[in-house]
Amino acid sequence: MTPRRRATLRDIAAALDLSVNTVSRALAGKDAVSPETRERVRAEADRLGYVPNTMARSLVQGNAMTLGLVITNPSNPFYTRLISAIEERGRVHGYSLMLMVTEDSVDNEKRVVDELMRWGVDGVLAVPVQHGIDHWDRLRKSGTPVVLVNRDLPGLDTDLVGVDYYDSARRATEHLVAEGARDLYLVEEDLDISPVAERVRGFRAVLDEHGIAVRDDHMVKVPTRRREASSQPWDPEDSYEIGRELAGRVGPGAAVLAGNDYFALGMYRALTEHGLSIPGDVLVAGHGDHPFAAYLAPPLTTVRLPAAGVGAAAVDRLLERMSGESGAGSPRQTLLPAELVVRASSRTANGGA
Amino acid sequence: MTPRRRATLRDIAAALDLSVNTVSRALAGKDAVSPETRERVRAEADRLGYVPNTMARSLVQGNAMTLGLVITNPSNPFYTRLISAIEERGRVHGYSLMLMVTEDSVDNEKRVVDELMRWGVDGVLAVPVQHGIDHWDRLRKSGTPVVLVNRDLPGLDTDLVGVDYYDSARRATEHLVAEGARDLYLVEEDLDISPVAERVRGFRAVLDEHGIAVRDDHMVKVPTRRREASSQPWDPEDSYEIGRELAGRVGPGAAVLAGNDYFALGMYRALTEHGLSIPGDVLVAGHGDHPFAAYLAPPLTTVRLPAAGVGAAAVDRLLERMSGESGAGSPRQTLLPAELVVRASSRTANGGA
DNA sequence: GTGAAAGCGCTAACAT
DNA sequence: ATGTTAGCGCTTTCAC
């Protein structure tokens, strides 16, 4: 509670009748200090409860030792794991994390990018909102490396570390087809972002290869209506409503692949309420392997996303860029593979391998 | 990509043949500047892409305009919503958020508190790891206000904003008893933290009042074994194992109250696998109202936690302390009420109100 | 081995 | 209305 002023190098110097400079070097562990002096300085620093002032140091050294993380929605379990991984990896390298949340609003994003610039963070990791390039461009032009995470931002010429959603959708779709599905639906959030686009591409590709028709109504878009800010990543309710409508028209060999497990969850209820059984009448698979997926009845087949891997790789890439080693290199895209976890919701008796 | 040096006040001043000071005042919108000068300065600042250096400003003004948030595990959906709420509320007041993750390790906590001190953040919000007071004490003695969030830390003389878990457990337990439960189990994580303790207290109180015996085996502790860091808040698997054992010994009028919905989820499987029906044979209720709760079969009765409210209230309390208005006041505890959401998992035909 | 001086970019006094 | 000086706390020359 004692609101006493923070001790500074000068306080220590004064107490010991040394120069500020010597104290600084002693504490920094530099060589040009006699062992005795160093000890005295250390002792006095302890006594005074000295804590170095990072901002002062950063100001003179010109680096903030801070990374900015711009994220759309920390309620999304995937991002949640990303945050942890990034925080951890950053800390290992001595970097603090400044967290900025955009709620998928470009206005917010502009604001937070600006703030990051003012702080002079050394690098930025970002899950970008879909539209709006200028502020990112400014940030990069100011000399701050930026690594995009999970979502691409066409038009911004920079690195990306994400998940190979094209492949994940392919694998899930292949699996469903192998289990006998012939009437397949892809349920995705109605957002124009790269993960969705990639999954759509993968889904279609597999069906094309198998000569299975893809009608427009096979591509189900769940309208995004963000409610109470960030309280939930996706609402099963939204896909539930879509699902009720869908339940009425699915044919034999029906299967639903959802872009996230919450949508799959909404489907569960819609389908079962309509008297359809999973996987008896409809196969269901999701994305994300959210904690509840394995514990649903039936357990949900889903794609496990390499969140920790993406986080770590993104930090590593950023640090590379910051160190300038590969600073000159052209932007690289790194897509980590996801893993299909097959559970009861997509297994038929007659099915697959 | 141009790694050109960031423009400073001095650059603007030089270009316009003004003093740095005038430029500073012009940009700050202070009165003592002629309108023309202000315009010229603004234009030049724009042209140069000037961005103020927050660290330099903070250094001279002595405030960082930054809040520290120390959290145990960002995967916990409750904390997730807390982060959003805190970030948002902080931003409204012009504060950036520095996020620190402890993974419930005291060692990590000491490290991050130290780092927060070095940054000289203006205030700290913290979900504390249970043991270890000294580093918090140092932080507060250094003049940084600290507000505990969700978990209390006995021995640390500071504010707390949290959830009234005593009351939430009481309400849930009352409800179960009203529905006819007579053999009640409380399933909690085996951690010595205040939320658990409070729920235990509430649970016992109600049973005592109803003259229902509470044997030791009614208090079920789920061993905490953190796996892959932060990938999950709690693992249904853990309570599943406990549940299998429990399923064998529940009597008539059995009910399970879980400290979180993930544990309830594990119970669902354990009980149904054992041939018990929910709510026919066993009533189940959870805590958290996690997104999946309403979509389970049967939908899970649970306690909805006021995460956004806690976050906002915590920031407000912190700002109060920072402004020193009530700085002198003694620590206050604010516990927000939670809301019981009754769903099918706890409703019997013969039951309740 | 130690100290004096300068400066990071900015704002706050105090001139003028 | 504008400029000068000083200083936030620290590190980096460069003397001694």
Image: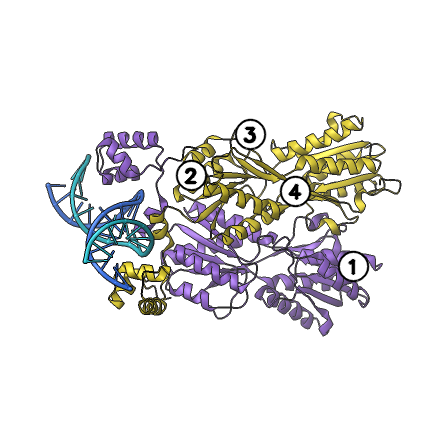
Chain colours: A yellow, B purple, C blue, D cyan
Name the residue beneath numbered marker 2. A114
Mark 1 burial class by Cα count in 10 Å: few <14, some 14-19, many 20+: many
Question: Of helix, strand and loop, which one carries label 4?
Answer: loop
Q: Is residue A122 left or right of residue B170?
A: left
The spot of residue B36 in percent (x, y) is 24, 29
Badge 3 amino acid: Pro
Q: Nearer the viewer, mark 4 or mark 2?
A: 2
Could you classify mark 4 by the number of other residues whose Cα lies within 10 Å: few (under 14), some (14-19), or many (20 or more)?
some
Q: Label 3 crowding class (10 Å Cα cut-off): few <14, some 14-19, many 20+?
A: few
Which-is-in-front pick, marks 1 and 2? Answer: 2
Badge nearest the viewer, 3 or 2: 3
| Residue at numbered disc 4 | A235
Which quadrant of the structure image shows residue A44?
bottom left
Residue type at tag 1: Ala
Q: Secondary structure at mark 3?
A: loop
Provide residue A288's location: percent of width, then percent of height.
68, 44
